[in-house]
Structure formats: structure tokens, C-alpha cells
Image (tube, helix red, strand yellow):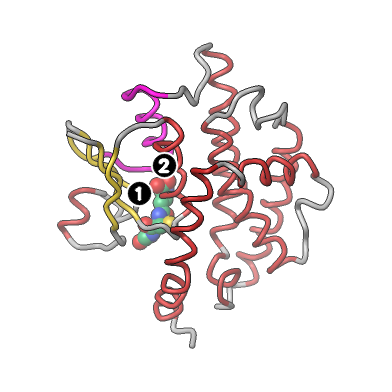
Amino acid sequence: MMLKLYGFPSSNYVNMVHLALLEKGVPFEFVLTYPDQSPEFLAKSPRGKVPFMETPNGYLNESSVLLEYIEEATDGVPLLPKDPVEKARVRALMKELELYIELPARSCYPEALFGAKCPDAIKAKARDELIAGFATLKRHAKFSPYLAGDSFTLADIVFFYSVQFGVSVGKKLFEIDFLADFPEAADLLQRLGERPHVQSIAAQRAVEWPKFIASVQAKYGVR
Ligand SMILES: N[C@@H](CCC(=O)N[C@@H](CS)C(=O)NCC(=O)O)C(=O)O
């Protein structure tokens, strides 16, 4: 059975897993799916979220777990180093990006994307966390020339989606340009953006994006 990835193209988390499959050259099927809380959906993805995957041995969920599963269970271009310490270093970067950039940015995403008001206390917390998150990345990432060293890894995939999101939240909500004094990150974003698979995912996202924004606006009662 071919692996199936369930999700929609406007989701950063879905795109990370989608990009890993494409970069590895693993055969898979993309099944356009929007999250919901129905019993049928929750039986496949227990928190009602995408992405999730169907494997020959059942369903799996959580993007970081899917990235690791794809790496371990399939052939193709390796996206993690073999050496346990080097591998742990890549995983540390992935975790820092998720916990300290993606998640704080996400806490304010309705305001960042379409102006629904985010409570001030949450905004203040997100601002502090994002500042610390970008400082962490600056300290830890190698940019030589990829995030964790000389080869493209899963950390570059998480970096590409989470950092762009963090930068856009910084600009829209806090008037902070997190790339202004971080040319290495700006340069890596640009180089990653030129990869053909990144561009094909971006093209699919661009088609769906207006519809996605309209649906979340409806959900938040904006406009
Ligand atoms: N921790 C999850 C987060 C996934 C996530 O938040 N997905 C969003 C789409 S970008 C979703 O399905 N949201 C629906 C919901 O929260 O009800 C992961 O890494 O897979």
C-alpha cells in the first residue's frame, strides 16, 4: 500500500510532511482533507488535526512524528544524519523551531492573518517568546550552508515554514523584523524557496489560500 498524506495545502504542518516526502522521493498519495471533530475523523487523528498519514499498519499523526516515521520507514534521500549525536542536534533544532517559534506565532495567528483581535496578554507572551525563539535560533543554527550543517535535513524543512510564519507575525503584530539583523536566515529562506519541490507546494498553497482565509474569517466571525 502506498503511503497516504491527509491534509490541505494552506497548512504549514501539512506542508512540512508533504515536502519531506517529495524531497526524499517517496511515492505517496495526497488526500485533500480538512480537519474536523467527527467520530470518523477522530478515529484516524485523535486530536482532530491534520496532517495525518495512512500506512500499511494503520494511521499516524503529529507532523514531527510523521517526519521521523518517513525517515525511518522509507528509502530515498536521507534527511537526517546517521551519527546519533549529529542526528540529535538536528532534532534539537526542529524542536526549538516548533516550541519557540511556530507555537508562539500560532497563538496569535487569527490577528496576524486577518485582523481578529488577539488578547493583549497572549500577544505580550507571544512577543517575548518569539524574541527568545529567534535568539535561540541565532545561537544554535549553523547555516553552513544548511541549518544544521552541510546537508539539507528535516530541520531545514521545519525552518522554512515556521520561520516565515514567525517573521510575518513579528511584522504584523509587533513591528519587529526578525530577519533584519539575521541575514543568514534570510539567505537560507531564499535558497530553500528556490527548490523545485518547495515551489510546487507554494503554488498549491497559493491556489487554496484565499478560500482558507475566508473559511477562518467565517469561523472567527470576522467580516
Ligand atoms: N501538533 C500538530 C499540529 C497540527 C495542526 O495544528 N494542524 C492544524 C492545521 S494547520 C489543524 O488541523 N487544526 C484543526 C484544529 O485544531 O481543530 C502537528 O504537529 O501535527
> Between disc 2 and disc 1, whose residue precedes?
2
Tell me the amino acid under the disc marked 2.
Answer: Val
Return the mark for residue 61: none
Please report the residue visible at 60 percent of the width from the left and 38 percent of the height from the top: 96
Residue depicted at x 54% and y 41%: 158
Name the side, left or right, on which 121 lies relative to 50.
right
| Label 1 residue near ligand 1, CB within 8 Å | yes
Residue 116 vertical position relative to residue 61 in the rendered view, above or below: below
* Mark 2 surroundings: few (<14), some (14-19) or many (≥20) residues within 10 A: many
Total count of labels: 2
Q: Which residue is mark 2?
A: 17
Q: Residue at x 45, y 49 (%)?
A: 15
How far across and how far down the image is residue 211, in percent?
42, 73
SS label for mark 1: loop
Q: Main secondary structure of the magenta part?
A: helix
Badge 2 vs badge 1, beta-carbon distance below 8 Å = yes
Decide: few, some or many residues near mark 1? Use Cα within 10 Å; few <14, some 14-19, many ≥20. Answer: many
User: What amino acid is labelled 1 in the image?
Assistant: Pro
Toward which corner of the image does residue 71 lie, by quadrant?
Answer: top left
Q: Residue furthest front?
A: 196
In magenta segment, residue 61: yes
Q: Taking the image as four quarters, which one is ligand 1 found in?
A: bottom left
Residue 124 placement, left or right of 20: right
Q: Is residue 17 left or right of residue 53?
A: right
Which span of residues is magenta-colored? 60-76
Residue nearer the viewer, 221 or 194: 194
Relative vertical location of residue 39 with respect to residue 118 in this rendering, above or below:
above
User: What mark, if any, has residue 51 been given in the picture?
Assistant: 1
Residue 181 drawn at (x, y percent): 84, 48
